[in-house]
Image: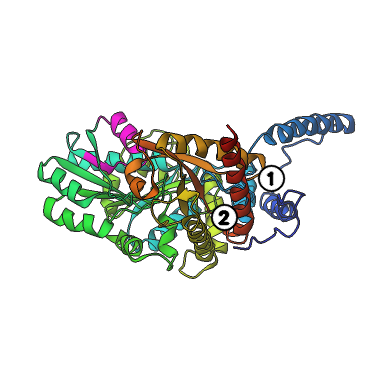
Amino acid sequence: MPEAGNSMSGPAGLDTQSLGLLQEALARLDIGFSGLPRSIEEGTSAHSTARHAAMREVLGAVADRLRDNYPYFHPLYAGQMLKPPHPVARMAYALAMWINPNNHALDGGRASSAMEKEAVAEIAAMFGWSEHLGHLCGGGTMANLEALWVASQLRGSDAVVLASEQAHYTHQRISGVLRLPFETVPCDPLGRMDLAALERRLQQGGVGTVVATLGTTAIGSVDPLRAILTLRERYGFRVHADTAYGGYFRLVDELAPPARGAFDALPEVDSIVIDPHKHGLQPYGCGCVLFRDPAVGRLYKHESPYTYFSSNELHLGEISLECSRPGAAAVGLWATQRLLPLVRGGELAQGLAAGRAAALLLHQKLQGDRRYITPFAPELDIVVWAVRAPSTGEATALARSIFDEAARHDLHLALAELPVSFFDLEAAGMRRDHETLTCLRSVLMKPEHREWMERIWATLSASTDAVLAKEARR
C-alpha cells in the first residue's frame, strides 16, 4: 500500500517529507486562533537561542536513545505486531498535540469528539452496523474489559466467560479484575475453538458470554463464529468478538471460506473489539469497543458536577469507563479513514491482502523445505513453523538459535510456544519429549512484505543453514 508523502526518506527509510506537510497544516491551524491576544512571548534573542539550543540537545539525546530499537518500520522486521502508522495519522496526531484535546467531555475536546464519533461510526459500518454504541479506548485490553463489564452487568457476576485456549490472555486477566468466573475451551488442530468441546461445556449451564477470537495473536486463527452463533440460539449466551488483531480483514476478499464465513457473521454478535493501532495504521494506543445495542449506554450512566454541562449532546465520557482520553488518537484515526476509506477493494484492503499474500508465499516455501515443519496454512497474515529435529526439545533449541542468527543479519522474527498437538510429529519423525514446542513466527502485516519475501526467505534459509552446520560440528 503506497504511503502518501513518503517519497523522501532517510537512509533507513524513515519518512521525512511529511514534516513539511505538518508545518503547512500547523500554520493553517494557527490562523484559526489568530483573534486571540498573543500568549507566548518571543523573549530576548539570547534567551530564545539558549532555549532552542537546550531543546536541540535534549531531542538529539532522544533520537540517540530511540536508535536502541528494532527497525519496526522496515520490511525486514517481520516479528511482532508492529508497523509504523500511516504518515497522515502521524501528522494529524502531531497536529492535534498543539491543542492536546481530551475526549472525555465536549468542553475538553469539541472537534476531536465529533471526529471520534464519525470515525467510530465508520468502523461500525464496516462491521455492518448502522446503529451502535462505541468509542475509542487505549487499546484492546481496555476495550475487552468494557465489553466483558457490560456482559457482566447484563448476565450477572456469576455467569461464566468462555474463550479458547488460543484467545488472548487478557480475557482471563480481565475476568479476574471483574471477579467473573472464566474458563478456556480447547482448540482443534487448526488452533480454532473446538465446537464439540464448547457445546459440552454449554450443556453444563451457567455460561454468560462466549468470546470468539477472529485473529488469535499467536497464530492468527479465526474461531468458527457462524457455528458459535448457531449454538447461541440454543443456549442463550452473549457473543463477544475479539477482533483486536483481525477485524480489518473483513475488508479482504481473498480469505479461505471458513475465515470468510466468520467475518461475514460479525453483524450478528453482541459486541466487537478492534485495534486501529494494528492494521488500522494508527499510533499506539488506539483501540475501539462497539456494542450492537445502543441501549447498553444506560449501564455507564453517572453524574459529574463539573464536566457535562457545556452541551446537551453526548459526551463520550458518558459512555466509557475511561475518563481522560487522548483526542489526538481520534484525530489521527479520522484523518486516516478519510484518506483510506474502510471499503472492500480500497487501498487499505489492498494492503491487508498484500500482507496475506506474503504469508501464503512464506508458508508455501516452508512447506516445500524439509528443514521445517508447518502446522497449518495461515488464515490471515501470521505464519508459524518449527525446525525439523529428532525431538521437540531439540527443535525448540534450534528455533531459538535461528531467531538469534537471523537477527544478526537484520531479519527480525518472533518466537511462539505452541502445543505439540498442532504438528504431525509422527510424519516428521520427531520424538515428543515436551508438551509444547517453541516455533518461529512471522507477522507479515506490512504490504511491503510481499515484495521483500525473496530477501526474507534467503536470509531465513542462510540463517538456518548456519545454525544446522554449527550443530552438525558439535
Residue 168 painted magenta: yes
Q: Which residues are magenta?
A: 161-179
- Residue 422 at x, y = what percent? 34, 47
- Report the quarter where the C terminus lies: top right
Q: Name the side, left or right, on which 340 lies relative to 57.
A: left
Q: Quick one: label 1 or label 2, which is nearer the N terminus?
A: 1
Residue 153 painted magenta: no
- Report the quarter where the N terminus lies: bottom right
Q: Amino acid at mark 2?
A: Lys
Residue tagged by mark 2? 446
Q: Report the residue at 64% width, 46% height from top.
A: 94
Q: Report the residue at 43% width, 60% height from top.
A: 249
Mark 1 vs mark 2: give the one in front: 2
Mark 1: secondary structure? loop
- Residue 428 at x, y = what percent? 39, 48
Mark 2: secondary structure? loop
